[in-house]
Image (tube, rainbow, N blue to C red):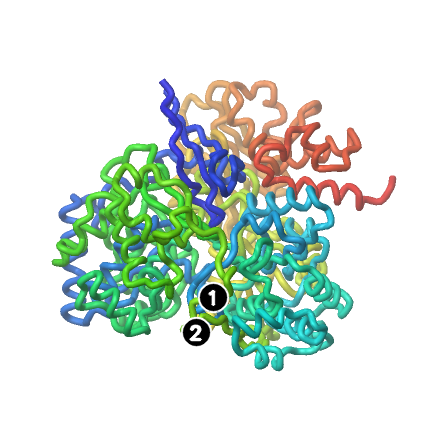
Amino acid sequence: MTEPAVRTTCPYCGVGCGIRARRTPDGEVEIAGDREHPTNRGRLCSKGTTLGETLGLNGRLLYPRWQGQRVSWDRALDIAASGIKRVVRERGPDAVAFYVSGQLLTEDYYVANKLIKGFLGTANIDTNSRLCMASSVAGHRRAFGADTVPGCYADLDAADLIVLVGSNAAWCHPILFDRIRRAKAARPARRLVVIDPRRTRTTDAADLHLALASGSDTLLFAGLLGYLAANGRTDDGFVSAHTRDAAAAIAAAPSLESVAEGCGLDVAEVKRFYDWFAATDRVMTLYSQGVNQSSSGTDKVSAIINCHLLTGRIGKPGCGPLSLTGQPNAMGGREVGGLANQLAAHMEIDDPVHRDRVRRFWQAPALAERAGLKAVDMFRAIEDGRIQAVWIMSTNPVVSMPEADCVRRALERCPLVIVSDCIADTDTTRVADLLLPALAWGEKDGTVTNSERLISRQRAFLEPPGEARADWWIATQMARRLGFGEAFPYETPAEIFREHARLSGFENDGSRDFDISDLGELDEAGYDALRPVQWPVPRERPQGTERLFGDGAFFTADRRARFVAVAWRPPQHAPSADFPVILNTGRLRDQWHTMTRSGRSPSLASHEPEPFVAINPADAAALALEEGALAEIVSIHGRAVLRVRLSPEQAPGSVFAPMHWGATHASDARIGAVVNAAPDPISGQPELKHTPVRLAPHRARWQAFLATRRRIDLATLAGTSFSLAVANGAWRYELAGVEMPPNWNAWARQIFPEARRSADWLSYEDPGAEIFRYAQLVGDRLDACLFVAPQRPAVARDWLVQLFAAASVAPYRLHLLAGQPGPGTSESGKLVCVCATIGERAIATAIARDRLDTVEAVGAATGAGINCGSCRPEIALLLRRKRELPAA
């Protein structure tokens, strides 16, 4: 009997989509969008749609492990507690640190933050949100007096001008982008401006794309402020009544001409943007990592907010700045003080009144007195020995942090590294002393908060596997063993949430933005049934609050917003003769962070199965780099080896590489090892978008494509570079080596896992051309295949992988070692539509055959793009490429 659907929330980006998950009698899980959730109204992107593919137990961490050996929970917790006690006794509390994650639920976050700041007495807790939204937090605090997001997603429907800054929302926030697209289709006069050095699937939909120079956003918006003032496009009444320091900010504004020169733009296109902003009453500015991940990220945020304050375009429908958070609970972590410079409930650790209030509420006499170390400085302190014990929760910093080799080295040197995670093998668990098995999505129970302040429930619909436990439970048990049991009596997440809510209202007379005190008395049933609600939720407003600042009252001491005079400064590290190219990093449409979840999905892996570096063709020619070749990318911090992708959309002098691959999925593609960690002096957020690098061909002696029915032991690939991806029924590998095996036939038989004597062995060898091809059949089914050549083997990879799902490959046997489908058989090409499993070649064929000219027509003809909409920008790109082809 099929169980009723459970309403929960997607664990990927900060959009916060509602999901209905239903277990079927055969043990599968059906995933569908929740039509009643206000964020997505039933729509899901490709990642959300395929969540069911990520729920298996293969690779899960199911039991505590100490130095590689399974131990009981009692033993594991005793080891952790005694180690932390020893460090505190010998070195003081500041020798302990926690590094946590936006993947934690709010209740998990709250307990961890209370434990370390309130009772261990150090604020050395930071979160991977430091890499994501710290500059936005700092910018909000400077302008508004608190980390307050003013607007909401409904403003997207009302806005007449939407400005996307440093955001490839089509890939990183697909459901929000789809909402923008639909709103624009409903009213074509609505304009979209995209500000991004790269041309992306988001810029394809723009009425104006400003491809500004990397890092020059502050200059652009500071110039806009001056332009608005000079042309009388200001709300003087609002400025006079509700703000301070406007004159100083305006005086610092650069001229239009200097903006154009500094940003590398034409004066005319800058003026067009300025004129549109000036003439439009309802303007929203959405910004994301291209703004935040910068050594001047806080100033970029301030420059954007200044423009909205000067025009009074804040607190009104269709107006305001909106920060697009990267993780599902980055906002929830900020609410409970997950950053090193915060206290819970949006109180500040540097404020003695706030410290006293939290100390009394928690009854925590040892409450930390000063801010702790932010992420970059934390790992540097681990490396130099100031921190002797670190607990990492639900994140993978050996991949995600900048200067990642230093992070790995720091953890290898640290006397006690505790990692709680749901995955057994990550780059970070490999350097841990103690592993604690945590629950995964589908097993967790708690709350998350999305980018528009919407608190939603994440509910469990799967039983905890093995001995995995909730993160809040692990932290509570640790607190009890450390001697703080009375302050950590929690037995359910609802108890934690109630305390969190009560703290938000404690001595809060309306001077603090975060107030959910109306939820502070929820019983277990009320918590279980909690509907999505936007904070603040004070007792007088139990329905929540859609947008803030409509009354012009901010959260500074005098209730006035602050303008901040900003001056553009270039990124900390400039290109040089040794490192002449700028590296930008970011996400792909169908992968997530370090692939510990999304990398388990065959559908998602099919979109981009291999790490790459995108480079302008002119730059590639100058560096003797060809499409599909391997390139070594080097900075002063480290190196990576990536596949070359020629891209005219990439600006000359810059390259782009995705952030997702670590050592568990590729041997040499960990781009975090290359990226610099130059921090913003205010927010501490590192400059992940601007690293000087050099590129050169990677001189591999041979390359290979390998596909097998079972994942192989990577130890057999010693000395060989690899990347791997899961596919339906198979694992696919790209290999490269600098030394030739003496006998390829023997090497192949060794590599193929579980080779059977009864297997049918096919081979083709051309030693003169150094081409070697092998296939192993078991019965009529393909079990493994290997194609070796001096360069990347020219075989139909997607077709070969599809053969593993075939009941018999007998019809294709003659074509198998050729690596190409025979006559009458076509390859679908790179997957475009995950929902309908439709590839690029099939879509391109339909466009040409049926003379299709719209995305809707492609959808009607092929079924692509009619479900979640994530692939619509790529379909539009295929249509544009077809239109740009010269006439025959």
Residue 44 is situated, as x and y percent measured from the top left of the image, at 52, 38
Instruction: Judge from the rendering whether residue 503 lies leftward or rightward of residue 144; answer left or right.
Output: left
Residue 272 is situated, as x and y percent measured from the top left of the image, at 75, 64
The quadrant of the image that shows the N terminus is: top left
- For label 2, the SS is loop
Q: In this orientation, which residue lies closer to the viewer: 456 or 383?
A: 456
Residue 632 is situated, as x and y percent measured from the top left of the image, at 55, 59
Q: Could you classify mark 2 by the number of other residues whose Cα lies within 10 Å: few (under 14), some (14-19), or many (20 or more)?
A: few
Q: Name the residue under label 2.
A: 558
Q: Is residue 142 above or below residue 108?
A: below
Instruction: Judge from the rendering whether residue 217 lies leftward or rightward of residue 42; answer left or right.
Output: right
Q: Are marks 1 and 2 in contact (CB under 8 Å)?
A: no
Three-letter code, disc 2: Asp
Q: In this view, does 243 lie above or below 866?
A: below
Toward which corner of the image does residue 256 lie, by quadrant? bottom right
Instruction: Judge from the rendering whether residue 504 lies leftward or rightward of residue 560; answer left or right.
Output: left
The quadrant of the image that shows the C terminus is: top right
Q: Residue at x 78, y 29 (%)?
A: 850
Toward which corner of the image does residue 751 lie, by quadrant? top left
Three-letter code, disc 1: Ala
Q: Name the residue under label 1.
A: 553
Q: In this orientation, which residue lies closer to the viewer: 391 or 318?
A: 318
Gap between marks 1 and 2, in whole Å? 9 Å
Q: In this orientation, which residue lies closer to the viewer: 817 or 770?
A: 817
Q: In this orientation, which residue lies closer to the viewer: 395 or 487?
A: 487
